[in-house]
Image (cartoon, rainbow, N blue to C red):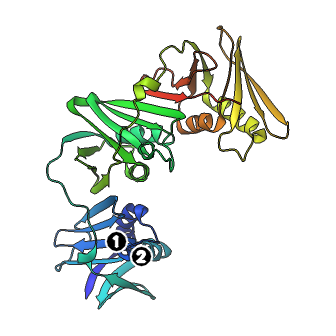
């Protein structure tokens, strides 16, 4: 039975949208598949890992007179389509329990599993709160904090990103207990307070799928999940159950010794001295000595080797000698795009506050190290 006859890219684009969460090795074999459903108006592609579900809809282009529903290996179908020329025509045909993929003289036969066996996230009808903002705004909220989110921390609530609705603000916070990134954006109207901890994997997928555009994205908060709807895509993710740390207590308020520095010059200096840091250490330290119009950056390793850089800065306050994790500094400088950053200190024993000059909505806090 002929199911679909279309251009390769018309099939490949929606498939690439949903396959990011698919793992090749699954406890349930069907979770390695994509659920393809078609009615007279549209065709949908859906994948799930039981914690998150992504669905995208193609309207019109793939429709036929007869509907169908099936599941087939997402990665294999994607790899087959990628191997074909971009302007080639592809036909999908169902033969018993196999899907035939044909293009020119190429033919592939993939095993089908029943659509009714595919586990879908239960759709909620009433949300606790709904907000709408621009895709670019949400993408920035995720991008500027996701590098600070913990990875496989025993404190499970740190392995996700806080997405908090508070009055007229949407706030995003990520921390691993040693550093914290914070950013906010204004909403159109005052909203009821809602907060969820979004898993790292969901943050990563959203960052890939969102556009740098003014197009809207709708966020709906439910009891134990959150739904994002944008550009014919619906991403539903379960949230991490736990209490996120009080980020307001972490953000320093007395860091009045500060200087601005060119981001790339600072980054390149850190990259050079890091060559002689202890590469095998999880926490690689760098010493920053801030003095009159001068910043010294020093790295040492276990072999008693040392690298030092000196940079000119505009600074006229008391000297500060502080040690920080060099990876945390480079993570920030690699993820922001501003021409310069501002570093603010209280003393050598308290956290450093790093911001973007003229930007009140972004803050990055790094705790000092003992080296």
Residue closest to the eye, 216 or 122: 122
Q: Seen in the image, is 357 located left or right of residue 203? A: right
For residue 179, above or below residue 79: above
Q: How far across and down, in percent of the image, does residue 5 sit?
A: 30, 79
Viewer-proximal residue among 183 and 199: 199
Alpha carbon of mark 2 to alpha carbon of mark 1: how far?
9 Å
Picture disc at residue 68: none
> Looking at the picture, how far across and down is residue 199, in whole percent?
39, 49
- State the image quarter where residue 2 is shown: bottom left
Q: Position of residue 364 (x, y in %)?
A: 51, 29
Q: In this view, which residue lies farthest toward the left?
A: 126
Q: Residue at x 18, y 54 (%)?
A: 124
Q: Label 2, on which residue?
A: 77
**Vertical position of residue 122 compared to residue 114: above or below:** above
Q: Name which residue lies at 62% across and 37% down.
A: 330
The count of marks equals 2
Relative to 120, 328 lies left or right: right
Q: Are marks 2 and 1 in contact (CB under 8 Å)?
A: yes
Mark 2 secondary-structure assignment: helix
Mark 2 or 1 closer to N-term? 1
């Amino acid at each position: 039975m002929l199911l679909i006859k279309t251009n390769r890219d018309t099939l490949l684009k929606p498939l690439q949208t949903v396959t990011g969460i698919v793992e090749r090795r699954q406890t349930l074999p069907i979770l390695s598949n994509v659920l393809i459903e078609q009615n007279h108006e549209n065709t949908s592609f859906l994948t799930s890992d039981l914690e998150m579900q992504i669905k995208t809809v193609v309207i019109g282009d793939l429709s036929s007179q007869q509907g169908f529903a099936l599941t087939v290996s997402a990665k294999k179908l994607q790899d087959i389509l990628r191997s074909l020329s971009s302007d080639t025509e592809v036909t999908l045909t169902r033969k018993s329990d196999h899907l035939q993929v044909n293009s020119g003289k190429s033919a592939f036969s993939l095993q089908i599993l029943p659509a009714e066996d595919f586990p879908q996230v239960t759709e909620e009808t009433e949300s606790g709160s709904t907000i709408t903002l621009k895709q670019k705004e949400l993408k920035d909220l995720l991008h500027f904090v996701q590098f600070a989110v913990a990875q496989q921390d025993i404190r499970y609530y740190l392995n996700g990103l806080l997405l908090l609705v508070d009055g007229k603000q949407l706030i995003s916070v990520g921390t691993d207990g040693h550093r914290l990134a914070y950013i906010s954006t204004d909403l159109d109207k005052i909203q009821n307070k809602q907060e969820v901890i979004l898993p790292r994997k969901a943050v990563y997928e959203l960052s890939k799928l969102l556009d740098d555009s003014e197009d809207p994205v709708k966020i709906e908060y439910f009891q134990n999940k959150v739904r994002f709807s944008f550009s014919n895509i619906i991403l539903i993710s379960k949230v991490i159950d736990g209490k996120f740390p009080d980020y307001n207590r972490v953000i320093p308020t007395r860091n009045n010794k500060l200087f601005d520095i060119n981001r790339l010059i600072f980054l390149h200096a850190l990259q050079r001295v890091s060559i002689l840091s202890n590469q095998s250490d999880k926490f690689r330290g760098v010493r920053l000595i801030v003095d009159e119009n001068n910043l010294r950056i020093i790295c040492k390793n276990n072999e008693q080797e040392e690298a030092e850089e000196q940079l000119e800065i505009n600074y006229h306050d008391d000297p500060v000698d502080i040690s920080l994790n060099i990876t945390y500094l480079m993570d920030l400088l690699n993820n922001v795009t501003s021409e310069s950053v501002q570093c603010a200190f209280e003393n050598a024993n308290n956290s450093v506050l790093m911001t973007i000059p003229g930007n009140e909505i972004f803050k990055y806090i790094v705790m000092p190290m003992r080296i």
